[in-house]
Each structure stands twice: as structure tokens, then as C-alpha cells.
Amino acid sequence: MMSLDPFLLVVFVVAFVAGGIASISGFGIGSLLTPLLGVQIGFKLAVAVVSIPHLIGTAVRFFTLRQHVDRRLLIGFGLTSAAGGLTGALLHTFVKSPILTAVFGLLLVFAGVTGLLGLAERMRFGGVMGWIAGAVSGLLGGLVGNQGGIRSAALLGFDVPKHSFLATATAIGLIVDGARMPVYLFTEGQDMLAEWPAIVAASVGVVAGTFAGYRLFKRFSETLFRKIVSAIVLALGLVMLFRFAREVDWL
């Protein structure tokens, strides 16, 4: 009788939690799974591998929320996000720098703090700034596999209700995944195929967590929802800064 790999069980549990968080905040799958798999297979390959369960989970979430998508926001913010995601995926092949981790972490900490203090609600992105925010979030998604925190932080600056926020963030994430995944498959397809057990475990966990988390999502008020998203963004930023400190041997 074949024994179950304990690491795959951990992957499933973390993926379940990540799917639940993503169903509430619009992001979290790549943020949790990428560092976990990075310990086992390396950060670079982990970014590519996680893109598959990320795509599956995002597609499931989009299907349940598709009627709430803000099409105006999707066109402006989403198209630049896709362009940024493709650019980031291409750069992912060449760029290796812990500075990216630090910059990403600092941006998320700033966004999380301003959200918790209520400052983010006074910010409104539109026109050029909205397009730039979309491009940056997509770029980070393709480059380091964590576009959701920046995207959600930027979307908090738009005056949209929680269902539209989550649905639009999900639709944009789906576009970014579609733009970056072909690059990963072309450059690292064989290595990704070798990690199919982890991909299956993560995908099943993410889907299960998505359905479980969506039930909780319906219970949150607009104010509480924004605070939860901001808190998750802040926590993610602190984790990224901790990772940077480890990479440069500060800890």
C-alpha cells in the first residue's frame, strides 16, 4: 500500500486555507503556497508551479461572482495588469534579486497600514494612476507570483462595493494568470510536470477552501471587509520583509 507523503498533506491544508482567504480578500493563494513550495523545490520553480492551482482557484471564484464584475474597472485596470503580468513572467526567467522581495514587502506594509487607519478610503485611483496600479500589480504577479496583495490594495482606492471588489479583483487575476502561464509552461514546463503530485494536492485544496470561505464572505459588512483585506495585506508585507531579511542573512 502506497503511503501518503506528509508534505503533500501539508500542501493540501495550506492550499485549503489559502483558498478560503482568497474567497474573502481576492488574493492569498500564491502568497501562502509559493513560499511553502519554495522550501521544497526552490522559489523560482514554485512561482511557476503555483500558477496552476492559482488559475484553477481563481476560475472557480470568478464563476461564482461573475455577475458582480465592474466592467469599467476591469477594462482599464485589467488590461494593464495583463500586460504587466506578461512582462513580469518574461523577467522572471532572468531576474534574481532579494531587493524585489523587500520592495514588495514595503509596498504591502504601507498599503495595509493605510487601509487599517482608514487612509486608503480617502484615496481614489482613476485614469492614468489606475492603469499604473494595474500594471505594477500584474508585473509583480508575473515576477514573484504575488500580485494579489498589491492589486487588492490598489482596488481599495476605487469606490466599489465588496462584491464588485472581489469579483473584479478575481477577474483581473484570471487575466493575469492567462497572460503569464504560457511563459512558465514554455520555459519550465518539464520541471513543472515533475511536480504534478504537489499541483494536484494544491489544486484540490484550493477549490475546497474557496467554497468553504465564500460562505463566510457573505457575513461581512463593507467596513469589516475592508479592514480584513488591509490586515491580510499588512501581514503579507511583514512576511515578505522577514523573507528578505533571511535571504540577505540579517536573521
Image: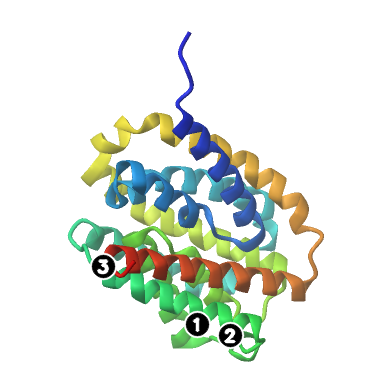
Q: Nearer the viewer, mark 3 or mark 1?
A: 3
Query: Which residue is labeled 1 in the image?
Result: 110
In space, the residues marked 1 and 2 are separated at their CA atoms by 6 Å
- Image height check: is 225 above or below 66? below
Q: In front: mark 2 or mark 3?
A: 3
* Quadrant including the C terminus: bottom left
In the image, residue 112 sits, relative to residue 235, either above or below, namely below
> How busy is the neighbourhood of tag 1: few (under 14 within 10 Å), some, or many (20 plus)?
some
Q: Label 3 belongs to which residue?
A: 248
Circle 2 sits in a helix, a strand or a loop, which is it? helix
- Label 2 neighbourhood size at 10 Å, few (<14), some (14-19), many (20+)? some
Percent coordinates x, y for residue 221 in the rendering: 80, 70
Q: Residue at x 68, y 50 (%)?
A: 64
> Do labels 1 and 2 touch, CB within 8 Å?
yes
Q: Which residue is mark 2?
A: 114
Q: Position of residue 150 (x, y in %)?
A: 48, 72
Q: CA distance from mark 3 to mark 1?
A: 22 Å
Q: Is residue 145 left or right of residue 16?
A: left
**Residue 93 or 171: which is nearer the viewer?**
93
Q: First in sequence: mark 3 or mark 1? A: 1
Type of the residue with mark 2? Thr
Q: Name the residue at the top extreme.
A: 1
